[in-house]
Amino acid sequence: MDDSGLTDLLQSFGLTKKEADTYTTILQHGETTAKEVSQEAGVSKRHVYNTAERLETHGLVEMVDFVTPTLLRPTPPDRVKERYRSNIDHLHEQLADQYNGAKADLETVQVIKSGPSLKKRIQKFIDEADQIISIIVPPVLLAELTDALAAAVDRDVFVLLVTYGNLKEQLAVDAFDLDEIAHVTRTQQTEVPIQLAVDGSFGLLAPRSLLTNPSEQTKAVAFGQSYIEPVVYGNFLSNEWKFAEETNVRQPNSLPKTYSCFQYAVMEAAVHATNGESLFATVEARSTTDTTTQKQFSGQITDIRQQLVEPTKGAVIECALDIETADGVVSIGGKGAFKEEYEAILTRLEIDKR
């Protein structure tokens, strides 16, 4: 198989073209450094390191960082095969579990075949959002969505935005304010597919070529299944969000404030805490082991674990608060929490003046 065939195959497994090209370069060298790869590919060493980190999460590359300079080593093919086989087996199990119960839901999957239809669908999903939006779009499309995103922010919908390309140039042309359209904005150096996830219920995936090269006859997929959206949102946090650079953080709301979106509450708690404020929380929550059990907890926030805003703490998709109650520390997560003791329903934050 030639290099182009290998690149196409790797892209079918979710790698971008640049990731696939970098991986094949490392594969051909057997063991190399970021400097050698950057010289051969004509990109910066920082770009190579960022790409290598993503390849490491895919199990394709090992970064040997206890030597100087850091070595980039391709994972042996047999181990790569075993990892992907395990992932496919796990995916098969998940699909089999969901298949029978999801037949009716499958009707809500829709294929989008044109750029104008894609824009209308994104606009519709944003307009219908009640709690949270995570979105990845190029700056040129972002400029067309500013009114819809600003309206969502005004409705108190929590918005996480990733864009890529020359954002400063687009801002100069269209003169929109990032504070008005998103609570946290990050930027990527490389192009990634358009993504949208809304309220844990529906979303959209689309190649950028649907907008830029309609002759390629590419398609987007919009879905309305509650079990697919968390996968898209999880991928958003663990890949595109994690490897993007924080560009803007909207000033947090004045407290006290009550939040129905737990991620929103945790993000603003983190910003207030970074500003040196001690926080008191009152949380309506249900047990993660017995969803019929609902309680109210009040106390000082003693720990915040989140990956939404710098400085981050905890695991990639972790979003949790520890509250010191009269009966001890209680750990609280968001919808679908499993590591924490309780899952938040409503969260009220206020400055702890004690």
Image: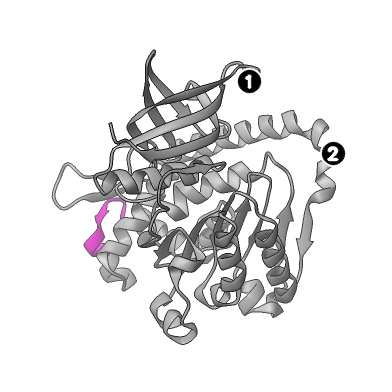
In percent of width and height, residue 349 lies at: 43, 39
In percent of width and height, residue 202 lies at: 69, 50
| Residue 61 among magenta residues | no
Q: Check the image and report above or below for 269 versus 326.
A: below
Question: Tag on residue 43?
Answer: none
In percent of width and height, residue 333 lies at: 48, 31
Instruction: Name the one closer to the observer, 257 or 225.
Output: 257
- Residue furthest to the front: 354
Marked residue nearer the N-terminal end (2 or 1): 2
**Mark 1 highlights which residue?**
291
- Residue furthest to the top: 327
The residue positioned 64% from the left and 79% from the top of the image is 213
Q: Is residue 48 something that shows in the picture? A: yes
**Mark 2 highlights which residue?**
103
- Check disc 1 and give the amino acid type: Thr
Residues drawn in magenta? 29-36
From the viewer's perspective, is 345 left or right of 67? Answer: right
Q: Is residue 318 something that shows in the picture? A: no
Crowd band around label 2 with a 10 angstrom C-alpha radius: few (<14), some (14–19), many (20+) = few
Secondary element type, mark 1: loop
| Residue 30 among magenta residues | yes
Q: CA distance from mark 2 to mark 1?
A: 26 Å
The residue positioned 17% from the left and 41% from the top of the image is 66
From the viewer's perspective, is 127 left or right of 194? Answer: right
